[in-house]
Image (tube, rainbow, N blue to C red):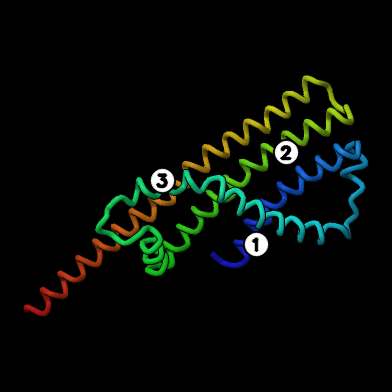
Amino acid sequence: MTTTQLFVELLIIGLGVVIWVGFLIAGIAGLSFEKSVLDIKFSLWPPLIAVAYVMGILLDRIAYSVFNHKKNQIKKKIFCHEAEPPAAIIERIVLESSEALNHMINYNRSRARICRSWFINFFLIGATFLVWQVRVNQISNMYLIFVTMGFFVLSLVSCLIGGILEKDHYNNIRHSYDYLRMHKNTEDKSERNDTEI
């Protein structure tokens, strides 16, 4: 994964943090939509992006800790052969063997990381949006319930999709490793046959 890709990934995660922190601050201060959002000057966007990037790093680590147990369960299920190297070594072998495989595996990992982080983001956006609207009372109760539940549903969907993508990520590594090993065995046999001739 390139530095630019990682930066964009953490920025996407961090922007979610900025949204729910913004709702939280607006709720505590009792700011309306017009005052809290539209008054942000253009000159404040660069520091806001910098803050979003840092927040993205922090939330990515928190999400990693939250999902770590589930991730280890998936890893154990897929890499269950005791005779083989550990999963981390297998992943390194695959990543170093082919640029195309490296790109594909990092892309899968990136999607899983974004999903597991947005599971937290969507939940906290929904919760802080609810707090903010209860404080400023700008929209009807029906609309408030609808929007809040929408964020909670998106959180649940992100959690489920994150788990599926995590499984796909490790399955991809598993199949890639099996393919490389099979390809190497075929090459070794071919070389042996050539030397015998």
Q: Residue at x 38, y 56 (%)?
A: 173
Which of the labelled discs sits on residue 7, or is there none?
Answer: 1
State which quadrant residue 99 falls in: bottom left
Please name the residue that numbered disc 3 is placed on: 74
Residue at the image point whose x is 62% and y is 35% from the top: 154
Q: Amino acid at mark 2?
A: Ile
State how far apart marks 3 and 2 are (Cα).
Answer: 29 Å
* Badge 2: residue crowd in 10 Å (few <14, some 14–19, many ≥20): many
Q: In the image, what residue type sits under mark 3?
A: Ile
Q: Which part of the image, by quadrant, shows the C terminus? A: bottom left
In the picture shown, does residue 188 fall above or below 37? below
The spot of residue 176 in percent (x, y) is 34, 58
Using the numbered discs, state the Cα–Cα distance from disc 1 to disc 2 in whole angstroms: 22 Å
Question: Residue lying farthest top?
Answer: 142
Q: Residue 121 location, x and y as percent?
A: 67, 43
Give the mark nearest the N terminus, 3 or 1: 1
For disc 2, the marked residue is 125
Residue 81 rendering spot, x and y as whole percentages: 27, 53
Identify which residue is drawn at 67% across, 39% down.
Answer: 122
Task: Give the foreground label among 3 and 2.
Answer: 3
